[in-house]
Amino acid sequence: MSAAINFYQQRKHIAEQSAHRQLCCLQGSDLWCQQQALSIIEHSALPYRWCGEAPASITCSDAKSLLGQDVYLLILNMHKTFDANMFAAAEGAVCAGSVIVLLLPQQQSEIDYFSHYMQQQLKRYQFPILLENQPIVNAQPNISTDKPSSPSIHHLDIQEQQLAIQKIIKTVTGHRRRPLVLTANRGRGKSAALGMAAAQLLNQDLMRIIVCAPSKQAVTTLYKHAKLTINDANNLQRLQFMAPDALSSEKPVCDLLIIDEAAAIPIKLLAIFAQRYSRIVFATTQFGYEGSGRGFALRFLQQLKLISPQYRAFQLQQPVRWAKGDPVEAFTLDSLCLMESTPTLHTLQTQQKTLIRVIEKTELLQPGPLLNQVFSLLVNAHYQTKPSDLVALLNDQDLTLIVMQQQNTILAVALIKHEGGLDNITSEQIYQGKRRPVGHLIAQSLTFHSGFKLAATQRFARIQRIAVQPTLQQQSYGSQLLNWIVDWATTQAFDHLCASFAGSDYLLRFWLKHQLQILRIGTRKDKSSGQHSLMVNLPLSQQGKELHHQIQTDFHKQVKVQLSRQLNQLDSSLVTVLWPQIVVTRPISNIKQSLSAYINAHRGYENVEYLLIELLHNTSLKVLTQQQQRCVIEKIIQNHSWQSIVQAHQFSGQKQAQTFLKNCICDLLTKTTTNEENT
């Protein structure tokens, strides 16, 4: 029997005895590793999945396709590089008593800090490694001291899951407007509980349940368990899947709405669903392969509390896919920084100075909580953070990490991506649409979309992330950090400091407050955020200021047209923040005289619309209330229908809406004229 098969059997035995999963690490040449993996597959005779580069005889699986499946032998080839997304997505599909065979290269590149880091983590968690032509390294078994009460892999505890099912059913049978928020780490049986609960409700003659998720693939497990629980398979027709966009636009009626993997759906849509449906279950993975559950908890639950103050929350903690204390789960969550690591901030000394500095990548590899603290903050700041972002943090030479700290406590972090600085030929190719170099988001967009041929030759410092500890927000720490970054970017000879973000009036106010101005608004909504993306910029050098002025002048002309076309669904609260940046205030006496028949007589809106557009393009709206600003923007600038205005502002009908708008214009003209006379 080969050493690899013997090694695998040892790991398999430990996994079965503890009802955990184990890693079988093989390190050597790619050919040797693949040969050993093939021999293990043949010896085990188990159904397997192989992710990564494989021999011609093997059918490879995409890691994300394993979500919701039961895997009993998993081969992960990490020879080219340690694929963090692959590992995080695939390991959660592996069942208790099973083994993950990890194929590792003999040597890593000196600058591949992430692979070196993962090797350190394997040693730290005492996963033994079989080296080509050498004895096993670190052969001590890593059986958890937290042993399960029942080692049988067929009798894992499901009592907590049954409680979750009862709570899901109560969402339908109990009081209205009390949505359930169900959270869990992977392997806790969340999707299975949703499926079983849905089937039980259908067995009780519930007419229609809608299941919504980012993709149909994401609810495979839910449907699998619903099918196993349903009394009559024909009734599964009443369990209907709908994509988020379809659910939003079609507005179907249902007895229960189940939203699975809610953290991957734009929060704006979740809020709409929470308002529209009285019986709803939001379920999401809390610390999963994308780590997005924390953004969900921080942002959406704040909104849900306003919409449904009596919402209920339940967290599944007991694993059902494997026993408690699983070493692979602990390794994954810790190594990929998917677990929250919030430092205790009650010891913060207000009189003690804070330090802002650049952190070198090698410092992140040192023992201690620094890496976890930093990445945890970055995950909290953004809903799309993936394990590959941890790889970039350690490996990307064009990424600078800046932290604000007090002693060893991280208060705030920023990631700065170095963009542009390309040669003239490459920049012209981007302008012509022939090239799209990876990692140059804003430099490329201003060259291609904004149409400035040599924009990408200038150097851009893009603020990719900026985050402050939640308990320290609204206390100017973010502003302090940003001011330091402006000085740093200037000394580093960048031409621009810029950022791209999903549009919100709160974020736009923050950037405008610090002199970053809008140069572009994406004409299509981002699939992940459900919002238009905005690009803001602060020119630093003389050539940067000249380019910025040219792009901004074009943008102001362009956006006035786009707001009634491609951007007519842009949130009006965002437009009101943007408006002072794009209008040029001029005397309006001639417009006032022309509009008198509209305000004081019965001249129709349609006959003076062109005058109203001219009025708004030459007038500040700050004299109006917030609702008045939104109404005139939506109707006059964005050309919303009267029906839409009535619904958005809860008017009794079109007549009341028209009267309100007329009063808005009257107030605007009267107060603006008074201000002009006073000045």
Image (tube, rainbow, N blue to C red):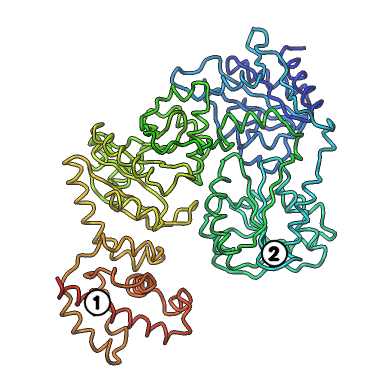
Label 2 close to label 1 by CB (< 8 Å): no
Q: Quadrant of the C terminus?
A: bottom left
Q: Secondary structure at mark 2?
A: strand
Nearer the observer: mark 2 or 1; the answer is 1
Task: Name the one closer to the observer, 295 or 675.
Answer: 675
Q: What kind of residue is marked 2?
A: Leu
- For image coordinates 73% across by 65% down, the residue present is 172
Task: Name the one closer to the observer, 319 or 34.
Answer: 319
**Quarter of the view holding residue 561:** bottom left
Mark closer to the chain start, 2 or 1: 2
* Above or below for 558 versus 371: below
**Pointer 1: residues within 10 angstroms few (<14), some, or many (20+)?**
some
Task: Name the one closer to the observer, 117 or 35.
Answer: 117
* Above or below for 596 versus 56: below
Q: Secondary structure at mark 1?
A: helix
Query: Mark 1 = which residue?
Result: 671
**Quarter of the view holding residue 95:** top right
**Pointer 2: residues within 10 angstroms few (<14), some, or many (20+)?**
many
Picture coordinates of residue 102, whole percent (x, y): 64, 24
Picture coordinates of residue 64, whole percent (x, y): 61, 40
**398 sits to left or right of 180:** left
**578 sits to left or right of 373:** left
Query: Mark 2 = which residue?
Result: 256
Q: What kind of residue is marked 1?
A: Lys
* Above or below for 426 versus 167: above
Picture coordinates of residue 493, whole percent (x, y): 23, 33
- For image coordinates 39% across by 72% down, the residue present is 627
Picture coordinates of residue 472, whole percent (x, y): 45, 44
